[in-house]
């Protein structure tokens, strides 16, 4: 006797989960890109940040000044990895030294969001940079976290 084979139609399962898999794959690509190279970019929250006008600064590691290296993408996720904003490029574009959450950046396409950032814990993931953790308070204040 041969092994039992029960045909299963997975079409509906794929359709139901395709959106989740798409976002999960975007985050996975960004995380892999970050973890493969030694950090050459440094990302930080710009001075006097607010949740409604959150500005980030990108620079070269070691100097803290000058433009960062070319990047594949940027994601802002909460500390449970829910995606709030993702932009991506082909790795031949640099981010500006200052950029605002949710804005259109030439050379990058928007893959997710931007969604409003309610109070809570967040991470910014930029290729070739250590993740930046920050907290948004109930009053809209933004505080970098270690």
Image: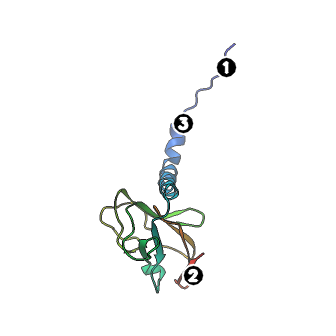
Q: Are marks 3 and 1 in contact (CB under 8 Å)?
A: no
How is the protein colored in the picture?
A: rainbow
| Gap in angstroms between the C-alphas marked 1 and 2 | 58 Å
- The quadrant of the picture occupied by the N terminus is top right
**Residue 17 in the image: x percent, y percent?**
53, 47
> Which of 7/113 is in front?
113
The tag earlier along the polypeptide, 1 or 2, is: 1
| Gap in angstroms between the C-alphas marked 3 and 1 | 20 Å
Q: Are marks 2 and 3 in contact (CB under 8 Å)?
A: no
What residue is drawn where x is 39% and y is 64%?
Answer: 69
Quarter of the view holding residue 88: bottom left
Mark 1 lies on a secondary structure that is loop
Judge the density around disc 3: few (<14), some (14-19), many (≥20) Cα neighbours within 10 Å: few
**Residue 19 in the image: x percent, y percent?**
48, 51
Judge the density around disc 2: few (<14), some (14-19), many (≥20) Cα neighbours within 10 Å: some
Given this view, does label 2 or label 3 mark the residue nearer the observer? 2
Q: Which mark is residue 3?
A: 1
| Gap in angstroms between the C-alphas marked 2 and 3 | 43 Å
**Residue 81 in the image: x percent, y percent?**
56, 62
The tag earlier along the polypeptide, 3 or 1, is: 1
Residue designated by label 2: 137
Mark 3 lies on a secondary structure that is loop
Judge the density around disc 1: few (<14), some (14-19), many (≥20) Cα neighbours within 10 Å: few
What residue is drawn where x is 33% and y is 67%?
Answer: 105
> Which of 111/126 is in front?
126
Residue designated by label 3: 10
């Amino acid at each position: 006797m041969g092994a039992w084979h029960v045909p299963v139609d997975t079409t509906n399962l794929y359709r139901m989960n395709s959106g989740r898999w798409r976002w999960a794959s975007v985050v996975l690509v960004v995380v892999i890109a970050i973890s493969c190279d030694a950090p050459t970019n440094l990302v930080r929250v710009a001075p006097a940040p607010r949740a409604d006008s959150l500005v980030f600064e990108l620079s070269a590691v070691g100097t803290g000044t000058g433009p960062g290296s070319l990047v594949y993408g940027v994601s802002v996720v909460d500390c449970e990895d829910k995606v709030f904003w993702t932009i991506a490029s082909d790795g031949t574009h640099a981010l500006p030294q200052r950029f605002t959450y949710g804005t259109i950046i030439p050379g990058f396409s928007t893959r997710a969001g931007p969604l409003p950032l309610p109070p809570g814990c967040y991470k910014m993931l930029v290729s070739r940079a250590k993740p930046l953790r920050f907290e948004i308070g109930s009053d809209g204040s933004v505080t970098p976290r270690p």
